[in-house]
Amino acid sequence: MPRHPSIHPSIHPSIHAYPHERVRVIDSPVNIKQGGGRNRALAEARGEYVMFVDADDALRSDAVAVCLETARRENADMVIFDYARFSSAPANIGEEICQLGKDASGLRGEDLRRRILDRSTPVWSAMYRKELITDNGLFFPEKVFYEDNAVALAMQLSAKTPVKINEALYLYRFDNLSVTRSTNNYHFFGRLASAVTLMDHLKRLGLYERYRKKLDFIFINQYFTHSIFGCIYRFDRVPMLRHNYIRKTISRHLPDYRSNPYFKAQPLRMKLKIFTHVRFPRLIKLMSNVSRRLHRAGS
């Protein structure tokens, strides 16, 4: 269990109060963020499989046992599971999320990999054979935000014997204030470097050419569309330097993105929304502010 100075103060005393021979605390003198902590844990891990848990989330008490039993029965190098949302405490469990669909439990091999492409899942939604990560060089970027985005899909597409189970084993806290939800936070743009790193990994592993059109569309969404929207709706004033940088980068990496079949298949309304947000960000921001004020005045 990697630990750095910003870790929740209750964790370390709890481990000392309930010691276990299979639990080790790994101290870091500096905050290397999640990416560095996960890499350190991968280097120290002695078992065959690994799982990832964010600091404010939790696992169902039998999660490891269920995944291990499935992995051994199926000879799986990755076991994907569902998750449940909770607020304040894991006891307040709410909606269960099955991102890949219940029928995905019957899919194997290429069929399951293509479902993952259609409905990408977080890095923490699976148990992985450690060699799947280390042998493919899929370590997390360190001291950055959105480190998961740089490797998660490459890990999941690299799995040769993936399995999906219909059990919500991960408990995801949705009422915290993280970078992914905060406003006026320039760490939001860490997603850009992560998207480029992911594409580099996919090309290096020979996965990019196999799924090129779909991966290009994922890149368009993850890097371009969501980041352009974020410039407008996550900041009080549109950061135009970042907005222009995003436009230039998508033109450099995917100059013909408009001809992508998945992009072209989007509803006209969505394509118009993207066009207006790209070309007229300040106007869209002004209209959004006016609309919000009118809504407040009428409520």
Image: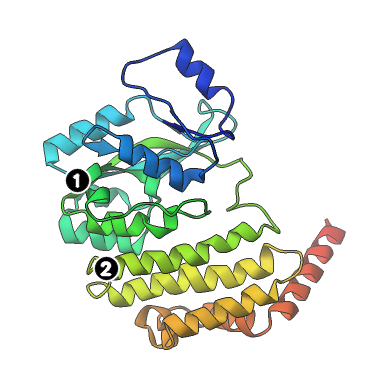
Foreground residue among 173 and 77: 77
Q: Amino acid at mark 1?
A: Asp
Question: Circle 2 sits on which residue?
Answer: 204
Report x, y in % for residue 16.
Answer: 47, 14
Question: Circle 1 sits on which residue?
Answer: 77
Quarter of the picture containing the N terminus is: top left
Foreground residue among 265 and 253: 253
| Mark 1 neighbour density, 10 Å: few (under 14) some (14–19) many (20 or more) | many
Report x, y in % for residue 69.
Answer: 19, 31
Q: Amino acid at mark 2?
A: Arg
Q: Earlier in the sequence, mark 1 or mark 2?
A: 1
Q: Which residue is located at x 25 percent, y 43 percent?
A: 130
User: Is residue 148 placed above or below 55 in the rendered structure?
Assistant: below
Q: Residue furthest right?
A: 297
Report x, y in % for residue 93.
Answer: 50, 32
Report x, y in % for residue 90.
Answer: 51, 28
In the image, taking residue 69 as reference, residue 30 lies left or right, namely right
Quarter of the image where one finds residue 89: top right
Q: Which residue is located at x 63 percent, y 76 percent?
A: 243
Q: Which residue is located at x 24 percent, y 56 percent?
A: 136
| Mark 2 neighbour density, 10 Å: few (under 14) some (14–19) many (20 or more) | few
In the image, taking residue 10 as reference, residue 205 lies left or right, namely left
